[in-house]
Amino acid sequence: NAGVTQTPKFQVLKTGQSMTLQCAQDMNHEYMSWYRQDPGMGLRLIHYSVGAGITDQGEVPNGYNVSRSTTEDFPLRLLSAAPSQTSVYFCASSFTGEGYTFGSGTRLTVV
Amino acid sequence: AQSVTQLGSHVSVSEGALVLLRCNYSSSVPPYLFWYVQYPNQGLQLLLKYTSAATLVKGINGFEAEFKKSETSFHLTKPSAHMSDAAEYFCAVAPPRYGGSQGNLIFGKGTKLSVKP
């Protein structure tokens, strides 16, 4: 039981490049979400999903896309990276109403 | 709308002293409340949660929190700080049955705890 696995752990992108942050969970959780963490800002919700095929926007969705084709996977795509997207990204999953399980994060730098 | 406020972005205590991290919430319905801990370069780990059962909630590593509806507070305490408690702590609020259309977890901005020897 690996929990929530995020890859890569570190990434440097040039402005305008695209990439996908991977997130996988093996706990059969129906709910998955992506947060970004910036100093002094806490965690802000980007996108979330309540099950395969269902996604919705969170507080800061601009510049990001998601899809949920399986229960296990919830990738986050950056369409055209900008320096403002430099952040630490966390994926989390849960059963509805239970505590979230977080991945270990992806530290992204956009130059 | 729900929100959570953590008072003090940095708290410093001596080893063996009481730890008190403050959290106040606003919610239109009785909420679920959580405390998470984040060690450097790691993800968030659930310390404890309040889900409308007992108002005093015990968590891992000797931490506990008390839900006080009259004060809209959910402060985190530990009687005696240890060096290993140095980390960042996040309070979070959610409506019951949160997740997706039921609402999401809303985090405070965090309190960094330092423990002096």
Image: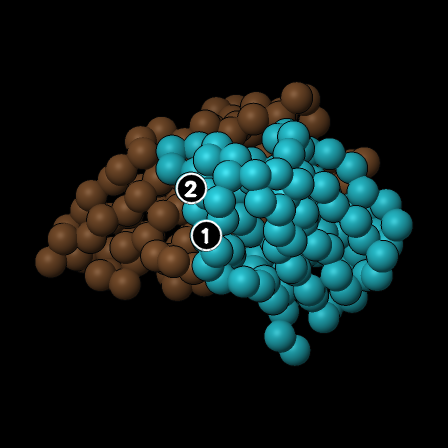
Chain colours: A cyan, B brown
Please state the total of marks drawn on the protein image.
2
- Do the CB atoms of the residues marked 1 and 2 lie less than 8 Å apart? yes
Q: Is residue A19 left or right of residue B70?
A: right
Instruction: Identify the residue shown where x is 62% and y is 51%.
Output: A19
Q: Does residue A109 sit above or below B43 in this rendering? A: above
SS for tag 2?
A: loop
Q: Position of residue A75 (x, y in %)?
A: 70, 54
The percent position of residue A40, horizontal first and vertical second, equals 38, 33
In this orientation, does residue A56 appear?
yes
Residue at 31% over, 31% down? B8
User: Measuring 72% from the left and 41% from the top, which residue is drawn there?
Assistant: A65
Q: Is residue B51 above or below residue A100?
A: above
**Could you give the CA–CA distance between mark 1 and mark 2, rounded to whole angstroms?**
7 Å
- Say which quadrant the N terminus of chain A sits in: bottom right
Residue at the spot x=30%, y=58% of the render? B85
| Vertical relation: A34 (above or below) A101 | above
Which quadrant: the C terminus of chain A?
top left
Chain name for mark 2: A
Residue at the outermost left position:
B117
Q: Is B14 displayed left or right of A62 in the figure? A: left
Q: Nearer the viewer, residue A40 or B25?
A: A40
Q: Is residue B67 visible?
A: no
Q: Position of residue A86 (x, y in %)?
A: 46, 41
Please tell me in which quadrant of the rendered image residue A60 appears: top right
Q: Residues within 10 Å of mark 1 (few under 14, many from 20)?
A: few
Kindly identify which residue carries mark 2: A111
Is residue A108 rendered to the left or right of residue A3? left
Q: Which residue is mark 1?
A: A12
Residue B105's disc number: none
Q: Amino acid at mark 1?
A: Val
Instruction: Give the mark nearest the N terminus, 1 or 2.
Output: 1
